[in-house]
Each structure stands twice: as C-alpha cells, then as structure tokens.
Image: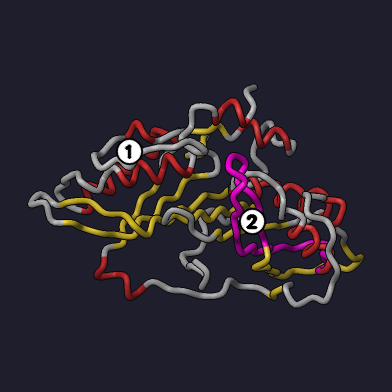
C-alpha cells in the first residue's frame, strides 16, 4: 500500500501552480482513505457513518451573457467514499469556473456534483446558496459545554491516546473545545478547528479529554483523518457506547472542511458555521 507521501507526489499541494480561469475537471486530485485508516486500525467495515462537509465561500462563474454570478457552495462527501479530495486541487478546480459560462446555478451544481462524485468514488451532494439566501445563514457557537476554561497544565503536543481517562460512573453529554490545532501533512501549515464530542458511556474526565485534544497541536494529518483518529481513540480508550465527533475547521483559501463521524446514526455535519468560520 502506497504511503501518504507517495500518494501526494503528484498532487498540487506543496507545489507552485498557476490560477486557472477555464473550467477543468482534471485539476481534481484524489487521495485514497485506506492508508491512513489502516494506521489507526480501520481495515474492514467502517466503525462509523459520516461525511466531510466542505463550504466554498468564494465560488464564481459567468452567465451566458458574461455577467459574473456568485454563490456559497456546499459539498457533502460521504465518509464511505474511497477517496478524499486534496484541498488545493479543490481550490484550483473551483477557480477554473471563474471565466467559464454556464446557463444557471443548477447547471453549475450538476457539473460539480458529477466531477466530485467521480473523484471521490461515491455520490457527492452539492448545494449552491445564492445571494438571495445569504441572509438566512446561521452563525452559532457549537453545542456542548466548553472545556477551554479548565485551569490545567499541558505539556504534550504530539498525539497521545494514553492521556484519556474515564470515571466509574456513566454519562451522556456533549463537550467541546475551540483550542484544537493540527498541521498540514505536506506544508506544515497550521489548521484550527472547533471539536465537539457527543457521547454516552463511562464519564470521560474533562481535563484528560482537553489534554488529549491539545496533543494534536503538532500532529500532521488531514482534517478527515484527525477526526477519525479521535473517534477511534475515544471508542477504544473510553469505551463509548454512542459517539459522535464533529470538527469545524476554519477556512483556508476560501474553503472550510467539517468532518463528522458517528456510530449514533449522525451522517452529516450540522448546517451552521462558527464565528471563526
């Protein structure tokens, strides 16, 4: 099985590129999910359902008269797709619409859905939010009790599942942090996110959970794989009976990615963006 670095050798990420203006589906670059899943022990049936919800805030194209159109584009890539789409290739692909003419927003959405589905290996749902609907978009703090004011010392910044601990009693609760940071596995650039943990099972010690989530601070991995590692570690170390892990990453290049993984029947990220997004 090829390594992540080998799979990325032909990707645009980490390489100088131009700025395409004419529609070009060949710009999309697929990365297999399997190698990084194998690293955390997922080799057969997935232990979760979920999706990766992308939001593109800067999408534009021309109508048939050459007049610019704009929209916020939302893409739901299912977690059981064979591939993720490398983020810089997605950015370049979307840029390629800028000087190309299309009949209407529905035509643009259909083209994107077809291209992304072919790249991911599974049907991708595409929604274009046009300016008339911008006023209805909701910004909110994620659900759950924040861990961020806990007065604790932290000194580990490489992922360490051994930091997790549980109490004897059980609980059903939603916890969150805005302090999450990881690194791009190619460029080393930081990625910031709000993480929400909704679980039922042995009570997770809150200080331990915050230390664990902060331990991703120097961890190099894509957004999707960070969330899957968190899901696997909490399932294994904390014996969660029901678990949903959501991440809302801040945008880079006009794109944010919001993975969710759940064994409680939750398949898609909530349609809300945080104040940082």
Q: Secondary structure at mark 1?
A: helix
Please report the residue visible at 83 percent of the width from the left and 66 percent of the height from the top: 203
Please report the residue visible at 53 percent of the width from the left and 61 percent of the height from the top: 250
Tag 1 residue: 114
Quadrant containing the N terminus in the rendered view: top right
The 10 Å Cα crowd at callout 2, few under 14, some 14 to 19, many 20 or more, is some
Closer to the N terminus: mark 2 or mark 1? 1
Q: Secondary structure at mark 2?
A: loop
Please say whether residue 203 is one of the residues in the magenta stretch: yes
Q: Nearer the viewer, residue 82 or 66?
A: 66
Please say whether residue 193 is one of the residues in the magenta stretch: yes
Q: Which residues are magenta?
A: 180-206
Tag 2 residue: 264
Query: Looking at the picture, how far across and down is residue 10, in whole percent?
Result: 49, 27
Mark 2 touching mark 1, by CB under 8 A?
Answer: no
Query: Looking at the picture, how far across and down is residue 65, in whole percent?
Result: 7, 52
Query: Looking at the picture, how far across and down is residue 51, in whole percent?
Result: 52, 49
Please report the residue visible at 70 percent of the width from the left and 69 percent of the height from the top: 175
């Amino acid at each position: 099985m090829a390594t992540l670095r080998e799979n990325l050798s032909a990707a645009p990420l980490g390489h100088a590129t131009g700025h395409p203006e004419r529609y070009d589906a060949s710009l999309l670059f697929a990365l297999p999910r399997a190698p990084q899943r194998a690293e955390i022990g997922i080799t057969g049936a997935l232990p979760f359902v979920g999706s990766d919800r992308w939001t593109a805030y800067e999408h534009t194209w021309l109508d048939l008269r050459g007049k610019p159109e704009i929209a916020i584009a939302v893409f739901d890539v299912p977690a059981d797709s064979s591939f993720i789409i490398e983020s810089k290739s997605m950015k370049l692909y979307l840029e390629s619409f800028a000087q190309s003419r299309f009949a209407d927003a529905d035509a643009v959405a259909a083209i994107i859905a077809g291209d992304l589905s072919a790249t991911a290996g599974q049907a991708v749902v595409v929604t274009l939010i046009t300016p008339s609907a911008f006023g209805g978009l909701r910004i909110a703090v994620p659900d759950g009790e924040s861990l961020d004011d806990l007065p604790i010392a932290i000194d580990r910044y490489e992922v360490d599942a051994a930091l997790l601990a549980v109490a004897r009693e059980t609980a059903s609760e939603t916890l969150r942090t805005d302090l999450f940071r990881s690194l791009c596995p190619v460029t080393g650039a930081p990625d910031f996110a709000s993480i929400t943990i909704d679980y039922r099972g042995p009570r997770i010690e809150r200080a331990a959970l915050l230390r664990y989530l902060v331990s991703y601070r120097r961890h190099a991995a894509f957004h999707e794989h960070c969330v899957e590692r968190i899901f696997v570690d909490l399932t294994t170390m904390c014996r969660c009976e029901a678990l949903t892990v959501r991440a809302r990453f801040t945008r880079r290049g006009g794109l944010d990615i919001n993975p969710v993984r759940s064994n409680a029947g939750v398949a898609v990220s909530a349609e809300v963006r945080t104040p940082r997004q």
